[in-house]
Image (cartoon, rainbow, N blue to C red):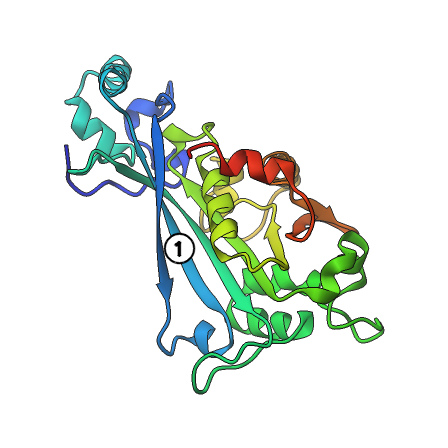
Amino acid sequence: MGGDATRVDYAGDLPQCCESTQLRLPRPDDAVFEVKGKFGHSEAWCAGLEEWHVRIGVSWEGDDEQTLLGTVEQHSRESDPESLLVAHGVSIDEDRYAWVGEVALVVTRLDVPVGRDREVLSDGRDLWMAADAIAEDLGRLATPLAASGDEDFDGWSSAVHEAWPNAFGTDAVILLRSARVTPVLRGHLLGAWACAQAVDLFDHGSTLVAAEAAPLQWRDAHSGIHPDQLSLSPDDSKVWQAEQTRLAKHLHKHLGLAPLPGHPSILTWHTTYRNDAFTSTLDLWR
């Protein structure tokens, strides 16, 4: 098989054959990841942040690959199975792997000078200023992590210290920005597994990990919401809130991230604390 896979982020991106019954592919036999960074003199790099992307690859072996093709054939007989897989965001390369999703994250080491003309970040306030200058979603995620003017802490908010008393010794921060898996392979914890691999890779032993429990776009919570829609109706707002609650539970169950006190949609973990849920997810494909 081969060819360039169609990028499929949302159920609405799936081909017409999924309008009545959405294709669900069997659990892969193996999963791998590929890491790429964005450096040079990018805006984020100069501000003291590193942008990373973790691509998710999966494979089926022997009889399981035949089962995969049989599942596709049963779903639709309008095209050959290989072409249908590509249309659903799954293209198996010459190494028998399909790249089916991606995790985006931002990482920073605190008090570590790296590179000329690059800012050195020391605490939560520095992190918030850098993140807010780069992108709205990063600023929204970093804001509750930073101490406000009336808080007498070492740059981290009282909420962070309440959740993680060891935060005073933080030497790195990982902001999990987004996780994307083609809809036909959701339910196998591939996104959570890739997030765990990313955290494990960039953890320096005393790292604050944070993520926002929010869909990538409105239509990820409700297919009826148009991408260019400027505001949500009361009913759509309820659907959006319900999806945030679902994602928060998912992040807690499979990554051990806990809601930050006073900020239920912001979830965190400090890697100096034991996390059995994280370890279990990390070991899914090892």
The answer to whether residue 235 shows anywhere in this view is: no
In the image, is residue 28 above or below residue 166? above
Which quadrant is home to the N terminus? top left
In the image, is residue 30 above or below residue 78? below
Residue situated in front as seen by the camera: 270 or 118: 270
Q: Which residue is mark 1?
A: 53
User: Would residue 17 be found to the left or right of residue 95 on screen?
Assistant: right
Residue 191: where, in percent of width, then height?
Answer: 46, 39
In the image, is residue 109 above or below residue 25? below
Residue 268: where, in percent of width, then height?
Answer: 66, 51
* Quadrant housing residue 129: bottom right
Residue sitting farthest toward the bottom: 117
- The residue drawn where x is 81% and y is 55% is 162
* Quadrant housing residue 69: top left
- The residue drawn where x is 37% and y is 66% is 38
- The residue drawn where x is 46% and y is 72% is 44
Number of callouts: 1
User: Would residue 95 be found to the left or right of residue 286 on screen?
Assistant: left
- The residue drawn where x is 71% and y is 61% is 144
The answer to whether residue 87 shows anywhere in this view is: yes
Query: In the structure shown, which secondary structural element does the residue marked by tag 1 occupy?
Result: strand
For the residue marked with disc 1, what is the amino acid? His
Q: How packed is label 1: few (under 14 Cα within 10 Å), some, or many (20 or more)?
A: many
User: Would residue 90 be found to the left or right of residue 244 on screen?
Assistant: left
Residue 88: where, in percent of width, then height?
Answer: 29, 32
Which quadrant is home to the C terminus? top left
In the image, is residue 102 above or below residue 116? above
